[in-house]
Amino acid sequence: MSTGTVATFEASLDRLDVDWTHASAAELETVLRDVCSDPTIGVPLTHDVTLPDWVNTDPTPDDLRTAATGITEAGLGIADYGSVVLQGTPDGIEPVSLFSDRHVAVLRESDIAPGMGAAFEWLGETFRTGHSSAIIATGPSATADMGALVKGAHGPKAVHVVILDE
């Protein structure tokens, strides 16, 4: 059972209807197979883990349009809000998290911050070291601009966070 900041993060994800799973590096491929739908696109991970061969890590624009699942790494989780921070890259990984109906964010347990204060400190340091952008994503895409709430209008309809245990 999780405690402290991790438990707060999990509870916040639950409130947002965001599924989550804990996994070790050795379990990651099995967990991803369980939570992803094909075709799956992704970006290489830097948490000393790699994506399985069945994940397309060099998607074309057509691949982005037809992908059912997009897998990205989250640099930070924000416990109080259930948000994940996705760092932009020069090659523009952001579409992998936005085009498919399901976004799977992979996050190290040690990268979960308690709140926005810690997140802003982390973002400041991240930007000072050369990253030029970041997305703070909180749950599935949703809008009520035209009346009733619509999920997936500007991004994924579903989000799943895989928390890498250390």
Image (cartoon, rainbow, N blue to C red):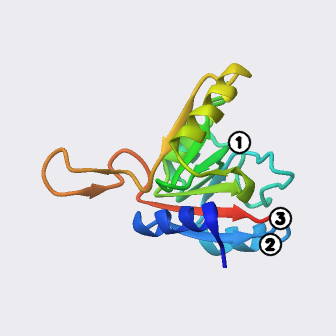
Between the residue at mark 3 and the residue at mark 1, the CA separation in whole angstroms equals 22 Å
Give the secondary structure at mark 2. loop
Residue drawn at 69 percent across, 20 percent down: 128
Pointer 3: residues within 10 angstroms few (<14), some, or many (20+)? some
Quadrant housing residue 133: top right
Q: Nearer the viewer, residue 158 or 87?
A: 87
- Up the image or down, 32 lies above or below 58; here it is below
Give the secondary structure at mark 3. loop
Residue 27 numbered mark, or none = 2
- Up the image or down, 81 lies above or below 10; here it is above
Amino acid, disc 2: Glu
Residue drawn at 36 percent across, 54 percent down: 152
Quadrant housing residue 149: bottom left
Disc nearer the start of the sequence (3/1): 3
Residue 58 numbered mark, or none = 1
The residue to which callout 3 is attached is 25
Q: Quadrant of the C terminus?
A: bottom right
Q: Can residue 40 be seen in the rendering of this structure?
A: yes
Disc nearer the start of the sequence (2/1): 2
Pointer 2: residues within 10 angstroms few (<14), some, or many (20+)? few
Residue drawn at 67 percent across, 44 percent down: 75
Give the secondary structure at mark 1. loop
- Up the image or down, 52 lies above or below 60; here it is below
Of the two numbered discs 2 and 1 in the rendering, the one whose residue sits closer to the viewer: 2
Residue 160 on image: x %, y %: 55, 63
